[in-house]
Amino acid sequence: MQDQLNEFSNESGCPKCGNKTVSKVKYTWWGGVLGPRMLNHTKCDSCGYTFNSKTGKSNTPGIIIYSVVIFVIAFALYFFIRNR
Ligand SMILES: [Zn+2]
């Protein structure tokens, strides 16, 4: 699925190629609408690198933590409903 993007200009620009035109990612396959917002997920228009606009670092560890948290909540919820 293609990420939905909302173009904006970031002062620091892309940490990989230095391009100033970056887009805020509105929706991702891993985090829906909430995930990218929580991680300030931003995508470079030039090279396609995704990063955290607040820290200027890769969001990969954040994505992994987010996925694990969502998985644990879903798993707990499933057992809670099943054992009632
Ligand atoms: Zn870039």
Image: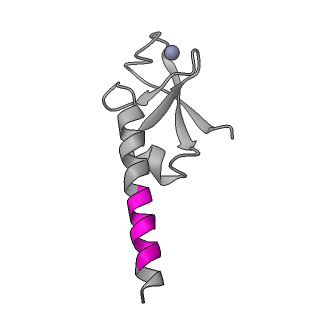
Magenta stretch contains residue 24: no
Q: Is residue 75 visible?
A: yes
Task: Name which residue lies at 42% across and 85% down.
Answer: 83
Figure quadrant of residue 53: top left
Asked if residue 1 is positioned above or below residue 32 in the image, the reply reads above
Task: Name which residue lies at 35% across and 25% down.
Answer: 57
Asked if residue 64 is positioned above or below residue 71 in the image, the reply reads above
Image side of residue 23 versus residue 13, left or right? right
Q: Main secondary structure of the magenta part?
A: helix
Q: Nearer the viewer, residue 1 or 34?
A: 1
State which region is magenta: 70-79
User: In the current view of this chain or complex, which residue is farthest to the right?
Assistant: 1
Image quadrant in which the C terminus is located: bottom left
User: In the current view of this chain or complex, which residue is farthest to the left?
Assistant: 55
Q: Provide residue 46's location: percent of width, then percent of height.
A: 58, 15
**Colouring chosen for the image of the structure:** one colour
Image side of residue 82 versus residue 39, left or right? right
Task: Name which residue lies at 47% across and 9% down.
Answer: 17
Q: Is residue 39 visible?
A: no
Q: Nearer the viewer, residue 67 or 51?
A: 67
Image side of residue 2 versus residue 26, left or right? right
Number of numbered markers: 0
User: In the current view of this chain or complex, which residue is farthest to the front?
Assistant: 83
Asked if residue 75 is positioned above or below residue 13 in the image, the reply reads below
Q: Provide residue 22's location: percent of width, then percent of height.
A: 52, 24
Q: Nearer the viewer, residue 77 or 66?
A: 77
Q: Provide residue 52's location: percent of width, then percent of height.
A: 39, 32
